[in-house]
Image (cartoon, rainbow, N blue to C red):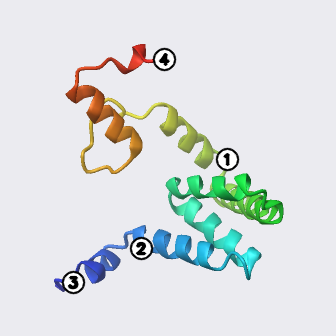
Amino acid sequence: MCKCPVIRTLGYVQVNFHVVNLIIMGLLSFPRNILLSALALNLACYLKVSPLILVLPFILSKEWRWLVYFVLFTSGVVVLISLIHGFEYYGNFIYNLIHNPYAEIIAFRDFSIDSFMQATFTTFDIDANNIK
């Protein structure tokens, strides 16, 4: 087995490299090719939900044409996946977001803002439910 982490990750079919490549392609192709940029970022958001935050700068900078392409691609992916797997695919996704069994567990390996805030509150014994 190869000792190179990049090759090992690709061998285990992890999508992180694909997501990063799609994000980079979407951001770098933006000014010249808006269609490719929206498609690449859409596919990155389909593979993982976290790149969805990168849509916010396009909204704030009022790039409406890019946003229309992104919404059209998103709608196309949703329709295509729903035709193949049925609408319960997205129903299960929303159910899993709402009823996350790991929400109470601090995951230090998870580099999310939620995990950071939860670890901070737990470390300093702060009740997050009473914060306004």
Judged left or right of residue 125, residue 39 is right
CA separation, marks 2 and 4?
A: 38 Å
Residue mark closest to the camera, 1 vs 4: 4
- Name the disc covering residue 4, or none: 3
Q: Which residue lies furthest to the bottom in this view?
A: 2
Task: Tell me the residue that label 1 is attached to.
Answer: 87
Work out whether mark 3 precedes mark 4 in sequence or the reverse, and give the earlier one.
Answer: 3
The residue shown at (29%, 83%) is: 7
Specify the amino acid type for callout 4. Lys
Work out whether mark 3 precedes mark 1 in sequence or the reverse, and give the earlier one.
Answer: 3
- Name the disc covering residue 132, or none: 4
The residue shown at (50%, 58%) is: 48
Specify the amino acid type for callout 3. Cys
Q: Where is residue 90 in the image (x, y as percent from the top left)?
A: 61, 46
Residue 7 versus residue 55 in the image, above or below: below
Q: Where is residue 69 in the image (x, y as percent from the top left)?
A: 79, 65
